[in-house]
Amino acid sequence: MSHIVTVQEAVTAFADWLEPTDAELDAIDQEMPVIAADIELMDAYIATLDRTPSELDTRRLRRARRRALAARVELTNLSAPATGVSA
């Protein structure tokens, strides 16, 4: 039995468009605090999946939610255009 193998990967493995652009890397760097906060929140959720959350778990979840929200707010404030208030 012969296997059908695609050569797409071999042909396009070194194509320029496969690498992220500088702008995309900058966007990832800017979003990294949100990503890290979401990972911390997921870790807190995962830790409580198989048991009833203790008081410590509840505090950890609450703290992780606040950090995730604060990171999102900060990112939103950085990316929102500054508009001045006119009189």
Image (cartoon, rainbow, N blue to C red):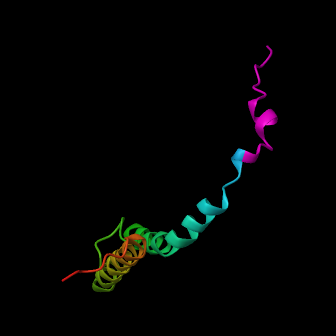
Residue 87 as seen in the image, left or right of residue 46: left
Q: Quadrant of residue 71?
A: bottom left
Q: Is residue 56 above or below residue 47?
A: below
Tell which of 71 and 5 is nearer to you. Answer: 71
Q: Is residue 70 above or below residue 29?
A: below
Residue name at image x 37 percent, y 70 percent: 80
Residue 80 as seen in the image, left or right of residue 28: left
Which residue is most to the left?
87
Quarter that holds the N terminus:
top right
The secondary structure making up most of the magenta span is loop
Does 8 appear in magenta?
yes
Image coords of residue 54 (percent x, y): 29, 81
Image coords of residue 33 (percent x, y): 49, 76
Image coords of residue 5 (percent x, y): 77, 24
Q: Is residue 58 above or below residue 16?
A: below
Which residue is most to the front?
87
Q: Quadrant of residue 59?
A: bottom left
Does 80 appear in magenta?
no
Residue 87 as seen in the image, left or right of residue 7: left
Total number of numbered labels?
A: 0
Residue 68 as seen in the image, left or right of residue 4: left
Query: Which region is colored magenta?
Result: 1-16
Residue name at image x 77 percent, y 19 percent: 3
